Structure formats: C-alpha cells, structure tokens
Amino acid sequence: MDYKQTAQGVLDHVGGPGNVISAAHCATRLRLVIADNSKLDKAAVEDVDGVKGCFEASGQIQVIIGTGAVNKVYDEFIKMAGVSEGSKEDVKQAAASKQNPFFRAIKTLGDIFVPIIPAIVASGLLNGLLGGMTQLWPSMANSSLYEIINLFAGAALSMLPILIAISAAKKFGGNQFLAAVIGFIMVHPSLVNAWTHYIDDGTGNMILNPAIKEFFHVGGYSVTNLGYQGHVIPVIIAILFMCWIEKKLHKAVPEMLDLFVTPLVTVLVTGLLTIAVIGPVFSTVEGWILAAAKALIGLPFGIGGLLVGFLYAFTVVAGFHHMYNMIEAQMLGAGGLNTWMPVATAANVAQGAAAMAVSFKSKNPKTKSVAMPSSLSAFLGITEPAIFGVNVRYRTPFIAGCIGGGLGGMVATLTGVGATAYGVTGLFGFLITPGFTLSYALILLVSFVAAFAISFILYKDPAEELERLKKSEEKTTTAVGETVAAGAAAAAGAAAASEADAASGTEAAGEPKIIYAPAKGKAIPSAEIQDPTFAAEVLGSGIGIIPEDGKIYAPFDGSLDLLYDTKHALGLTSKDDVEVLIHVGIDTVQLEGKYFTAHANSGDEVKKGQLLLEVDLAGIQAAGYKIDTPIIVTNTDDYAEVKGIKTGPVEPGEPVIEVR
C-alpha cells in the first residue's frame, strides 16, 4: 500500500483539509470528525486503494483500513490535513458536540439504561418463573416461597428510580452515592406509593388514596406527598441538576469545607427542587410520552404495531433504538405490561429470517457462513450482525425484514401480548411473557414466515444474476455482440472455476495452518460478534471468543508485530506467515488502556501459550463495553479458505481456526 496516496485519497473525499476537525485511529480504522458531512463522498472513500470500508457512527466517520497499515496512513493523514494528533477521547468529544441535540439525548438515554438492563431482566424472568410455577401448582400462590420470590421479582421495579439515579450520575459525572440518596428520596416510605395512587374503597370502586396530602399549594400549582415509583424522566432530570450543582460547589467551596458543605447543599437543594418542581412537572411530561406510546401501539386494527414493527429496524440502523428502553421502563413502572417488547421481537425475528433466506439462496460460501449465524443471533435478540452484515448490504433482505416486522407487530398489538421486563426479545421472550405463550409464538411465526418468503423472492444472488445476464446477452445481441458476450461468458466461467477451485482448497497443498485459542471462554462465529465491521468480516475471516478469565495468550509461535498503546488489540504473525488480529472487546479503544496490563512488547518473539495480556473483564463491562473478542486473519485474501473449526466452550491452546 502507498500510505501517502491512501491518506490523500481519504482526505480528498472527506472534504479536504479545511473540513477535518479531529482525527485519531484505533487498531483497524481512522476515526474522523468533519465539519460538513455533506462533503463526504462515502463511495469514493471506499474506492481508495487500501480502504476496506467507510461508515458513519456516533458522529464519527470511520474509515476501515486494517492492522499495521492504519497507523501509517494516519501519520500521513494528519500531516496533510494540518490537524494535531488526537486521542480517541478527543474524537469522541468532538463527534458528540457535532451531533444534534436529539441524537445526543437518545445516546444519553442508552448510556443510562443499558447498564441497568440485567437487573430489570432478572426481575422479569423471576416474574415469568413465578407465573409458570403457579400455573403448574396453583396452591403455591398461598405459600411463603411465593411471597419470597415475589419480593425478589418486584425489587428492581420498586427501586427503579434508585437504579436510574446511580446510572445517570455515572453518565453525568456526579457522585453515585449522592444520586442514590436522591433516588431514595423519590421512593421514600414517607411518601405515598405511586402504585397505590388509586385504591379500592371496599365496594369495588377505585378512589383517590386518602393518604395523599398536599405539601403546599400556590395558585393552581400544588405538590403532594406522592412518590415516584416506576418513574423515569423525573429521576434523570433530577440527577442532571444534582451533578451540575455538585460540580459548581466543588469549584466554589474551599477544599477544607468541601467534604461537609458540598454533599449537604447538593442533597438539600436537589431534594427540595425535585419534590417541588422537577418531580411534578416532569412526571406530567412523562405521562404524555407514555400516553402517546400507548396510543400509537393501540391504534385500531393493529396499525400501530404495523408502523412500529416496520420502522423499528430503521431506528436500529440510525442508532436511536435505545430510547425504547425508557418507554418500556415507563410501561412497567406504571404497573402494567410492556407491550412494546413483542413488537420489537417481531422486528428482530424478521431481520433474522430475512438473513436466513439469503443463506439458503446464496451460492457464495462466504455469504452463507455470515448469513446463517447472523440470523440465529437475531432470533436471540442480537440483530446487528444480521442487519449490518447481511441485510443492509443487499438491501432487499432489509426491506423484507421490515415488512415481516410490521406484520408481526400488527399481530402483537391485535393479540395484546405484554412482557414483564425489557431488554430481552426473540426466543428468550417466552420467559417474560407468561400467559401469552401461544400468541407470542404466533408473533414469531408470522414475522419469520413473511420476512423469509419475501427475502427469498426478492434477493438476487450475484452468481445467479451473472448467469441470467449471460443467457440474456446470448439471445438478444447481434453476431458481433454475441462474440463479445461469449468472451465475457468465458471469462466469467474461468473466474467461477477459479473460485470453485479455491473453495475446494485445490490451490492450497499440504496440511492446513492452525490458529489456537488465545483465551478461555466461548467461541462464536464471527457473524455473532457485536460489531458490524467484524461481523461482516470486512477485515478478514475468523471467529470471536467471549473470554472468561481475562488472560490472553499467544495463538501460535511467531512474533508480536504490534501492541497498540491502548493495549486493547494485538497484531501477530505466525512462523508460517498467518497474520492475526486479537481485538479484546468492542470499541474498547475508548478506554485508553484502562483495565489492560501487557506482558509483552511490540517486536517480541512469542511462543504458543505465552501470556501476552491480562484484562479486567468486569471493569470493561462495568464501563459499558462488550467483551466479545474477535480473532481475525487479516491476510485472509492470501488463502483459499479461512474457517472457524470450533464453537462453544474453549480452553487456551485448542485449535479454533483452520487456514488453507
């Protein structure tokens, strides 16, 4: 690769030096922020020699180049662009500042809700388990075991404002323990539980709880002693204010008094403002949002489910589907069922079915190897591999998935299926939809059948299209044209024969080259890696490993060509010239080396099984990052076949990839 020429090509097609705000790089890609995104010519960037892909994500332009070359292209790029070398955090902040307020708000909601999903899922699954057990053993409803499990099942939702407060404080940079105090104030036992706002008067009539009293009344504005169980938006706004005032106090209060004054004033002022203004005002706003969502889902004849199910995948592509977590939490917090989740399931299963149709119809082994695992992943609720790795790439499967999602969403709203948690979709959704088993199964069936059938019909395999065009040309061209067509057909046939030979391994004599597992954990197909670039094998073929103990070992005898300064990725070359990238976690470049400890250096000779890296997996996950670890053969194009030979539990040193 001519690094200078590649850098110049990228710079020219992102709008030139004057359009570049910030630049950094990670193990595989340039990360750019530009002033005017309309000047980006994405197709032209992808045509630049050395560029393997280009996409926009979270306000950044990410140009995929690959290991070893990206840092050299980056060095040339920053010289040409006239920008200083930036860290990944610099680029992240620059990108965030460029995003419009709506997308920034959506990302913030996702950052707050994603960490607390496990707690909500646990509660929902316990509710589902409890419902199933009482159906099998009705007498259990009167037992002490029922009371205990019911207590566990309701804990997360009862204390939801505290969970949200802690997560929001982490996002906004405030003290998480002070935030927990604010959250507890909002659900304090001295306040009337919001779920008992209305009570039975003993005759079957629901009346306003007489325990609700006014704190104060000014004109038409009144504040009561009603708690905020199940509320979302008031908590987030309260913690946003708390973090703001806490930071101001840290700057203004003398250091010797800071420990006493700042917490006192922060809790007192935030608490008073929350009870007097933030809670009453924003709980009303929240009520409007919830009412709008319920009204949309409740449109007659299932039209609401049809619209939401059809558009859901578009919001995943745009990256603002995390806002649905808030709507689902509101539905559960209001004491009802989550009726949004079944529609999301319809959309996810439909995208998986569309990808599966591509797998069945395609004659390309690589397409099949990506599409089938991606579809299975989508059936379990992880749709990014199917959407980005298959469906969006071929377009018609994506549209087929949207249509299937719309039809399944219509069934979901017509049948009234509801869930007891959020964060779980697909096949696992049976666990949180007690009492709706048959209806939920019908949603999955309609979504799958519609999307699969439409995708199978609309998807045109490139090999079949080539054959069809050849036959068409042979029938319709003139004698001269027929000669040209025959030549083209011969060339295409030779290429197809060459590809067939390569696929069968006839060009690779001798024993296969083996790459061994660099970590203990669970091996997964690359299509299930939760990053579209790795899932689509843009950088090369391989597998992923979900590590268990955080130790990364050398996968063969060879050399450690590159250990990135952030230590999240390693580039190695085996004695027989197989080049491998081990990328620990997804987007962990943002951690700037935190949680990573290196035991080797760039340029070292390494032996199979030698400890290279230790990783604090719990710390990475607590910081909000996934620990999927791609193991990628970056010089895949040099070989006839690169395939994973192991899935499921693996130990370090087990064969996992075969190269021929």
Image (cartoon, rainbow, N blue to C red):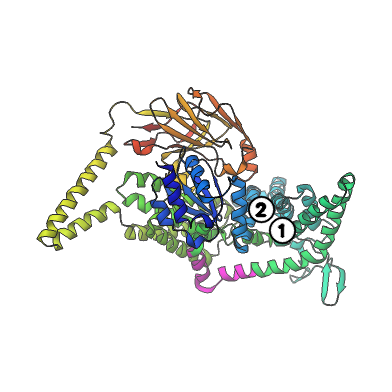
The image shows residue 464 at horizontal and vertical percentages of: 26, 54
Amino acid type, mark 2:
Ile
| Residue 45 x %, y % | 42, 53
Principal SS element in the magenta part?
Answer: helix
- In magenta, the rendered stretch is 290-310
Identify the residue under disc 1: 236
Q: Can the viewer see residue 466? A: yes
Residue situated furthest bottom in the rendering: 219
Q: What element carries label 1?
A: helix
User: Do residues under tags 2 and 1 come within 8 Å of each other at their CB atoms?
Assistant: yes
Q: Residue at x 53, y 29 (%)?
A: 602
Residue placed under numbered mark 2 in the picture: 112
Gap in angstroms between the C-alphas marked 2 and 1: 9 Å
Identity of the amino acid at label 1?
Ile
**Image vertical order of residue 46 relative to residue 552, above or below:** below
Residue 522 as seen in the image, left or right of residue 476: right
Q: Residue at x 56, y 44 (%)?
A: 587
Image position of 268 (left or right of 535): right
Q: Which of the two residues, 268 or 66, is positioned nearer the viewer here?
A: 66
State the image quarter where residue 472 is shown. bottom left
Residue 129 in sight: no
